Amino acid sequence: MPVDLHLHSSVSDGTDTPTQLVDKAAAAGLDTIALTDHDTMDGIAEARARAADVGVRLIPGIELSVTYDGTKMHMLVYFTEPGTEDLEVMLEGLRRGRLRRNERILERLTAQGYDITPEDVSMWARGPSVGRPHIADALVHKGYFATRDEVFKDVLRDGGSAYVRRTGLTARDAISKARDVGAVTVIAHPITIGKPEGGYEAMYRELADLGLGGIEAHHPLHSLELRAHLEHLAGSIGLVATGGSDYHGTGKRDYRIGVGRGDLRVPASAVDEIEAKRFT
Ligand code: AMP
Ligand code: FE
Ligand code: FE
Ligand code: ZN
């Protein structure tokens, strides 16, 4: 049965509510899904309730932005329980960091002549996790750009004229925090990571020793060759090769639920394998 372990709802930067997301997953014939909103678990209760109604298995998760020796990466965390105090406090801190960063991004945009206020941005955020995608939505709404994607190619791209770095967690801290709460970490879409000094494999091995559970081999940004390579590499290190569509609704137009750009196939066995990593 098809599975999809990387989905975003409108609680972060997707455009479907958790209920709509689960309904679309069911309609797509998916058996197991993970909700992985950026820096918030606020969509999980709703998604879980709907999933129970429609007979889909829902794995609660989040996606974090972390650093590894100066390189940025995204980390998926599975089996995160809303209400876990340690985790909620950490996420609250990360979201506050986002808000401070958003203010600095708006200062830059204003200095460059864009008319944009915090209120313009909050109009587009339907949950507590507010970031660049919502600033992009506001710029599109105001007529400065045609799509989110255009903004991310221009002023808001990493290193772009209004870009501000986020200060966040390290990969090591994220893994350790996840272990403390019985969750499992997976490195998201590895193609987006700049090559670390010691090379990719050394990084995976070091993080695996610290408790990393897997690598997201199956992602729409990866070529079929890269998916196969990462699956093999994960296996050789004892990591699970997971995958998902990174569906954001109309927030990323060409990623479809369950199938990505059409050729995504996430092995169903990844679900049990990643769950088995929970207590190791
Ligand atoms: P932030 O977390 O505020 O740094 O924003 C990064 C998020 O923006 C990513 O996790 C993506 O979900 C989203 N994003 C990045 N590139 C694009 C794009 N080209 N189009 C739409 N959303 C994007
Ligand atoms: Fe996103
Ligand atoms: Fe990501
Ligand atoms: Zn994502």
Image: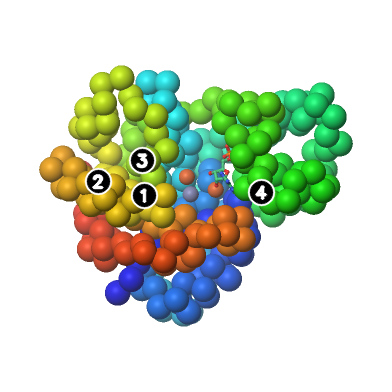
* Ligand 3 under 8 Å from disc 2 Cβ: no
Q: Which residue is mark 3?
A: 190
CA–CA distance in space, label 1 to label 2: 10 Å
Instruction: Answer whether labels 1 and 3 touch (C-beta < 8 Å).
Output: yes
Above or below 126: residue 72: above
Let me know if residue 37 appears in the view: yes
3D distance between C-alphas at marks 1 and 3: 9 Å
Where is mark 2, residue-wise? 230
69 relative to 16 in the view: left or right: left
Question: What residue is drawn where x is 54% and y is 25%?
Answer: 167
Residue 128 appearing in the image? no
Instruction: Please report whichever mark, 1 or 4, sits nearer to the chain's N-terminal start.
Output: 4
Is 190 situated above or below 147? above
> Residue at label 4?
148
Q: Are marks 2 and 3 in contact (CB under 8 Å)?
A: yes
Asked if disc 1 and disc 2 are in contact, CB closer than 8 Å, the reply is yes
Q: Secondary structure at mark 3?
A: helix
Crowd tier of the residue under label 2, counting other residues whose Cα lies within 10 Å: few below 14, some 14–19, many 20 or above: many
